[in-house]
Amino acid sequence: NLAMLYQASGRANQVEGQLRTALLRDPDFYPALVTLAQWLEANGRGEEARRLVADNLKQHPEAALLQHTQGLMLIRQGNTPSALTHLREAARLEPGNGQYSFVLAVALHDGGQIDKACQQLEELLKRQPYNRNARLSLIQYYLENGQEPKAQVVMQSWKKLNRADPALK
């Protein structure tokens, strides 16, 4: 992506133009839209970034990437309840995307909903048993919640799946 090359090479003044050009060519190219929103946010134009995502989300509520991005933006604003709505929708729209489910679980945990976070991670591990981040987090959340026996079960199943993992040493 030319915009990312410009950013990496210190030509930040050309990043926005390249991303907007990409969106003119394909308005539904959500990775470019999300990258533009992130770039705007990082350059002190957070309100414009939020408006860009929100406007596109109104037109395309079925776009999991936009739902996920909106959720992350709301978390950064400190609006976790609204963020959870969007993160849940992203995970529902793309259940095969483990990152969406994982981020939802972390947001639930950070919002004090540890049991729901554990349930989310349990479901994710049924679909993706080798998801290391989900497994580590589930162990941690169980321990935080005083459920050491459940943490031990997850740890033992992890050992069976991946004996060589350095975290198990």
Image (cartoon, rainbow, N blue to C red):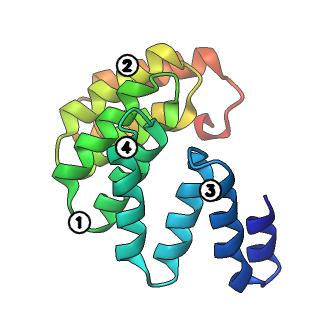
For the residue labelled by badge 3, is the local secondary structure a helix, a strand or a loop? Answer: helix
Circle 4: residue type: Gln
CB contact under 8 Å: marks 1 and 2: no
Q: What residue is rendered at 52% in x and 29% in y?
A: 97
Q: Which residue is mark 1?
A: 78
Give the distance between the C-alpha atoms of the residues marked 4 and 1, in whole angstroms. Answer: 25 Å
Give the distance between the C-alpha atoms of the residues marked 3 and 1, in whole angstroms. Answer: 29 Å
Residue 63 at what x, y percent from top left?
44, 37
Circle 3: residue type: Leu
**Of label 4 and label 1, which has the lower sequence position?**
4
**Of label 3 and label 2, which has the lower sequence position?**
3
Residue 102 at what x, y percent from top left?
43, 37
Q: Which residue is mark 4?
A: 59
Say which quarter of the image contains residue 109. top left
For the residue labelled by badge 1, is the local secondary structure a helix, a strand or a loop? Answer: loop
**Of label 4 and label 3, which has the lower sequence position?**
3
Query: Which numbered mark, 4 or 1, is in the foreground of this view?
Result: 4
